[in-house]
Image (cartoon, helix red, strand yellow):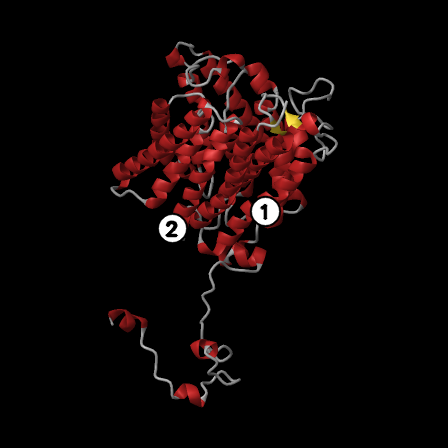
Amino acid sequence: MEINTGNTAWLLLSSALVLLMTPGLALFYGGLNRSKGVLNMMMMSFSAIGLISVLWVIYGFTLAFGTNGNAGVNNVIGSFTQYLGTETSFIGEEWLFLGAGTGIPTYVFMVFQMMFAIITVALISGAVSDRLKFSGWLLFAFAWFTLVYLPVAHWVWGGGFIGSKIKALDFAGGTAVHINAGAAALGLVLILGKRVGWPRESFKPHNVPLVALGAGLLWFGWFGFNAGSELTVDGTTAVAFVNTQVATAAGVLGWIVVEWIRSGKPTLVGASSGAIAGLVAITPACGFIAPLPSVLLGLIAGAVCAYAVGLKYKLGFDDSLDVVGVHFVAGWIGSLFIGLFATLQVNSAIEGLGASEGLFYGGGVTQLGRQALASGIVSVYSFGVAVLIALAVKAVIGLRADADDEVAGIDVAEHAESAYDLSPTTGSSGGGAFAMAGLTSGSGKPTPEAAAEPAAAPVGEKIAG
């Protein structure tokens, strides 16, 4: 089989779009965070890019998507050897990803899935802002990626038992990404504990425009996330693209309507969060359901998640930026929607995968049960292993930053920098505007030439003319 240049170009573009989502997530989470912890929050996303990229090349891809050997355990984990270190001995036709007959080089499929692994790990970080040691984050991320993400990705997409035995569907990551990350976030925060002062003190977003910018980049990149998951460029790709847009738009409306009813004021943070809820919910279903059910899915996800984010106050777990309330909850909603609205009219491959159409298309409750079982398995496994990893990290190097550092600001304590330099721009050593004009002496005092210069008008006077 020859390389299909159209499919290959589309998947390369989609890979770049999915990578963009992680810096977008850093901005989204960073804006939602307090100013004294924004850099630490963003560092967790950027460090995930570095860490997971390297691990994926070394052993991640082969364990998630390898298919040879392993003496009968391929329903649980991929190959220990097939793509270890991404073998370079494969050339020509042998190095094509032939499983779906797409004509895509395996390296391209490998890098596309790499971007999924990166953002799944980064998603967890939003639950633990302001209090998790950076070293503890790196060790947790390494262990969770290895012990949870890789097996789950194999179960869902790599030929494992969720896809091959249970016959549950997940087009682009409802179970493998969002439920997986949301369950892990819950397990981690229960071991990590609450932020100092939570919930008594206010933890408002410090930069709402940053939140909206991050949400916009996520929305943009999500087209590669969802439509790219078809791998080829065909009718299902087009439906997935459209569904991603309309479900997200409906998620915005669903969330702000709830805000309007509950508090009388719609907010930009709410609209941005509603967009994320819609994006998460449509992810598993985008290639299996039609546009009108996608609108309904987005509305439901936006509204339900707007209420779900308040559960942490009732149940007493400090999920800082609502990873559980948005990603876990919306992931479940989207996964179950497949059991209600999946149809062969959108994706004829449903039948070939051994799955059934949804309840409202004559398929009964069979597929709904499969989706619930798969989502439940991933939830329990990810939560349980995350708890064990967190306990191990806590015992070995510690999870929690010092309380004094948390109160003063984790950015300075963990990274020796701050997001916003609020120091004066003038002083004895700098000379301010005079220094920039070369009109100060070594002591910082104005030179005689500067003294003769007329004083600059205040900014307000300049504007007023």
Say which residue appears at 55% left-offset and 43% top-offset: 192
Say which residue appears at 34% left-offset and 36% top-offset: 252
Say which residue appears at 49% left-offset and 27% top-offset: 233
Callout 1: SS? helix
Is 443 on the left-hand or right-hand side of 268? right
Is residue 437 in view?
A: yes
Residue kind at label 1, given as amino acid type: Ser
- Assess disc 2: are there few (<14), some (14-19) or many (≥20) residues with their C-alpha within 10 Å of its C-alpha: some
Is 308 on the left-hand or right-hand side of 227? left
Q: Which quadrant of the rendered structure holds the C terminus?
A: bottom left
- Assess disc 1: are there few (<14), some (14-19) or many (≥20) residues with their C-alpha within 10 Å of its C-alpha: some
Q: Is residue 412 above or below residue 319?
A: below
Q: Is residue 387 above or below residue 26?
A: above
Q: Position of residue 197 (x, y in %)?
A: 45, 50
Q: Which quadrant of the rendered structure holds the N terminus?
A: top right
- Quadrant for residue 147, please give it: top right
Is 457 on the left-hand or right-hand side of 190? left
Q: Which residue is mark 2?
A: 209
Q: Position of residue 242 (x, y in %)?
A: 39, 29
Is residue 202 in view?
A: no
Q: Position of residue 95 (x, y in %)?
A: 68, 28
Question: In the depicted view, which residue is nearer to us: 79 or 34?
Answer: 79
Callout 2: SS? helix
Q: Which residue is mark 1?
A: 47
Question: In the depicted view, which residue is nearer to us: 202 or 247?
Answer: 247
Residue kind at label 2, given as amino acid type: Pro
Say which residue appears at 24% left-offset and 70% top-offset: 464
What's the distance in space between the residues labelled 2 and 1, CA to CA?
Answer: 23 Å
